Image (cartoon, coloured by chain):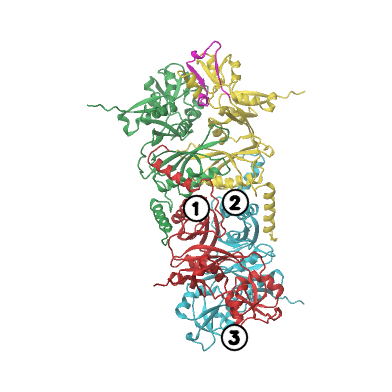
Chain colours: A red, B green, C yellow, D cyan
Amino acid sequence: MSVQQPARYAYLGPEGTFTEAALLALPEAASVEAVPYPTVPTALGSVRRGECAAAVVAMESSVEGAVTATIDELATGEPLVIIRELVLPVSFALLARPGTVLDDVKTVASHPVAEPQCRRWLGEHLPDARWEAATSNAHAARQVQDGIYDAALAGSFTATRYGLVVLAEPVHDVAGAQTRFVVVTRPGPVPPPSGMDKTSITVGLRDNHPGELMEILEQFATRGVNLSRIESRPTGKAMGRYFFFIDCEGHIADARVGEALMGLRRTSAHLRFLGSYPRADGQSPTVRLGTSEQEFAAARDWLEAARAGGSA
Amino acid sequence: MSVQQPARYAYLGPEGTFTEAALLALPEAASVEAVPYPTVPTALGSVRRGECAAAVVAMESSVEGAVTATIDELATGEPLVIIRELVLPVSFALLARPGTVLDDVKTVASHPVAEPQCRRWLGEHLPDARWEAATSNAHAARQVQDGIYDAALAGSFTATRYGLVVLAEPVHDVAGAQTRFVVVTRPGPVPPPSGMDKTSITVGLRDNHPGELMEILEQFATRGVNLSRIESRPTGKAMGRYFFFIDCEGHIADARVGEALMGLRRTSAHLRFLGSYPRADGQSPTVRLGTSEQEFAAARDWLEAARAGGSA
Amino acid sequence: MSVQQPARYAYLGPEGTFTEAALLALPEAASVEAVPYPTVPTALGSVRRGECAAAVVAMESSVEGAVTATIDELATGEPLVIIRELVLPVSFALLARPGTVLDDVKTVASHPVAEPQCRRWLGEHLPDARWEAATSNAHAARQVQDGIYDAALAGSFTATRYGLVVLAEPVHDVAGAQTRFVVVTRPGPVPPPSGMDKTSITVGLRDNHPGELMEILEQFATRGVNLSRIESRPTGKAMGRYFFFIDCEGHIADARVGEALMGLRRTSAHLRFLGSYPRADGQSPTVRLGTSEQEFAAARDWLEAARAGGSA
Amino acid sequence: MSVQQPARYAYLGPEGTFTEAALLALPEAASVEAVPYPTVPTALGSVRRGECAAAVVAMESSVEGAVTATIDELATGEPLVIIRELVLPVSFALLARPGTVLDDVKTVASHPVAEPQCRRWLGEHLPDARWEAATSNAHAARQVQDGIYDAALAGSFTATRYGLVVLAEPVHDVAGAQTRFVVVTRPGPVPPPSGMDKTSITVGLRDNHPGELMEILEQFATRGVNLSRIESRPTGKAMGRYFFFIDCEGHIADARVGEALMGLRRTSAHLRFLGSYPRADGQSPTVRLGTSEQEFAAARDWLEAARAGGSA
């Protein structure tokens, strides 16, 4: 009688991070083993090496922007693909050891992404406290538990794991902040189109000639494919050389997306397909006149008839 | 024992036109029966009705521009396709009845296309002569023969057919004038790519929105297909509504041309394929980086692998 | 006491042409002397030489397209400008000598522009009649009067001038045909913007590189200027070399039109300004967001402040 | 008799950062007082409040990409402008307290930007050491001095300031890494064009419609202005809303740059001019045909003549 092992899912730990909260929000959470890793590269590396079936990593914050470690890791090395995205509200609390009052707080630790989101609150309520960087907010909480710092910025759900209490909540400056997380696996069958999908790629410039970025955008525009995001990242080879991380509307199985990607493949460099997956916001893409599946199919029929010498 | 009838080729007559000269320049000229028709529409109609296997018609003059009757006839009605083009030098002579001297010439007849090409010469040498329009230069010669006019502008080869002599030659203003002729048939198997082909189409605007012509041009540009000619023609429905006659480099069997035409088919209106055929000037098309057959094939392979979930 | 001579206006004669009808439709018609010329070039030449103050010439037919003689004459030689356009309905009648019946008609003459507009009618009602070209419809009427031809296609108003009667009316195939006429003068102060103007130019390609036409269109598009018409015309120098005649919405005094024309002047060749004048259809141009006079002025103020080092 | 106070220049401290090294590389370094600030926002704030005349801040790393704190601070709040850029090679050393050997190192601290640049070296030479984030590399060195961590990644010049020694050098993975620094002041007269300048702006989308980024790029392309860098940054208002930080070639005093910026001002949102300043690499911009100062001036003259009714 065999016992099925639960699938292992990597995440940016330690316990109590927002990334862990994202993992726990997945439908399959109850049946997977969540495994913390100290950094995004190590979490993704565990998937590449087959130690984990998937990794949950942050991709983007509505306040802080791209999580560049995630983009850079996906762009190079053994291929990985995104199979799902989640967008979670992010709300910070100020955590401290029991018995601490606000006036006691001289040092506040957090991941660097959290600091700017809470900067104004800190300036008003803790003008004399010094901020210290930590590798994750949960790690900051642990350092507070260890007595290294007085307080940590983290999700309130982190408090109990490290024996802390919530001193103040919420402490961020902008209401409605969100973080986008993605579930990453090794390449495999692409999830079928849901009708409201997103496709992610990275693509490089062929020779950095003037207007080359615009040509990349035109490959999408000519096929009526909208971009929802574009990030430039350094190639690391020289100042002023970039590659681009792009999210577009639609699924790689869509004719218009497929033709746009073929256009990039022909005219750009280092195209990498990073997955087609349902959009977290559930919005259907705008399909412009002349770019539906039916219109692509009709155009292909027309071309075949014309090539065969029929009257077209 | 059966006797093979020679194929019948229609042309803009009467005998002695430049169009007949173009027909006689075809390699198959010796084995075809040349049949004159009074107008371009009647010549093309003879092909549509199956009376003739092909028609030779003028398409464009380097001095006078488009032969609009040809464009308009190809754009509507039963489909026809171009299978070949020829570019011939055009050189006008002044023809008159034997015994005429220049001072006798009070009226000069020609096809309206010839008049502007000889206008300056006429102004200098026959400032008082009146010009009269004829349906073809050869018809003008016949009218001179009939005594209706004193002289005709036509090719010198026309003189003997109508009992005329050459009074002056050449009489055009611009040296190096050329006319482009095309051989038109009913749709059938497209001639295979020669490596230096041209493709002709007509295409209409879908809804006349601002920038729609630019979108048509972008369908070609994004696939690296150069245009060699674009003519706007009225649709006849209202002032300010046009369709376009376009010649582009390459063959409909080329991946880049095919994809551009499919793009037009999807986003424009009334696309009509008018043939792919060898260019008269024998120039090879410029194939831009990323638009060769090999690059299109590689991109398609890439897409199929990515869609199948392989690492791409 | 001096007597004011009436201004002389040239037109394509002889009396009874549609062009004369257009001239007579001008508000100032009562106070000008209408002078017929045998061709468009001679009519425009009379303005260049100062014999006439203005010329009325046909520019475009909704059925037959561009009047290429007009475009080509305006594109070269001493500069002329358009100061006004008129669009008139064109309706053909079949004119003959009194006493003629339809069965008597063996020959029908007209300007070549009229023939295709009446082709189907002729095919049905006069299938055996032969069509003959004339330099104008009125000239055809005169030739009918002279007994050379049996009938002429012309406006019904032409009949009485040449002692003819209307045998049939209307005889054109497409209802609603229109012809656009323009009033041309020597350069002078541009008519002030009316709020619904059109601007005409001719422009050449600098070096015929691929995509050059699209670059011309982009000069307009980037400034939100819509084109209402574009015609390609041969330069006459070699097969495959063209210049373009363009009508765009708006007035040269408009900031967006001015900037677009400066862009053409910098990047193209042989730009010629052919006038800004009220549109015959009285339509106001679409002014896209960011392209109004106010927005251009505000942008200029912003730039000046930024250049001066103010905070912008 | 008055004594002139030296100008105060803010930088990201503490002493020993690469930013301090950049400040010391300025020609005026000898005559300015360098004032360390704990973060980019506080350094820039000191300029806004008038405490310092200028701030030196990192803008971009050839390995890690944008310094988003710098971009985000320049994009909002009281306007600041860049007056100069410097590009410095960045070379990391492993610093430790005297007497430490490599085997003793269990923890390595650095700014998060340094970690990925040294990741592979650390993996090979210190596979078991734990990396810890610090707010600057110099701060990490101070924490090593304080005994909190065993070693720090920093420039070797940092060692002596904190009583440390160099354990290994260089320790980065990619040779030739560079960081770009900028000198920022309050708005004032723009430095005159040097002939090889760069202009920085931030610009937002007006309504996030499809293709809006491409329209921004076209404003530059139509005027022949090349971009050297584009970064997207979240507006902080909602997931999926971005603004762009753009560096383009040329100076705001250049006609082509000025017209492109006016185009952005008209059609985009939140345009902010962040300075024109000499490029660190000393490269002259490519000036495309039709976009030189002379050609812009000639086009303006042409337009004025045409508007005045001269023959143009």
Secondary structure of residue under mark 1: helix
Badges 3 and 1, same chain: no
Q: How packed is label 3: few (under 14 Cα within 10 Å), some, or many (20 or more)?
A: few
> Does the stretch in magenta take in D37?
no
At mark 3, the secondary structure is loop
Q: How many marks?
A: 3
Does residue A224 sit above or below C252 in this rendering?
below
Image quadrant where residue A176 sits:
bottom right
Amino acid on which the number 3 mark rests in the picture: Asp
Packing grade of label 2 (10 A; few <14, some 14-19, many >=20) is few
The span from disc 1 to disc 2 (Cα, nearest Å) is: 35 Å
Q: Position of residue A209 (x, y in %)?
A: 49, 57
Farthest-out residue, bottom: D99
Q: Is residue D280 above or below residue D119?
A: above
Q: Amino acid at mark 2?
A: Gln
Residue D294 is tagged as: 2
> Mark 3 and mark 1: span between their CA atoms?
55 Å
Q: Is residue C210 visible in the rendered structure shown here?
A: no
Region rendered in magenta:
C91-118
Please state the horizontal and vertical placement of residue A101, each as a whole percent of the image: 70, 80
Which amino acid type is marked by label 1? Gln
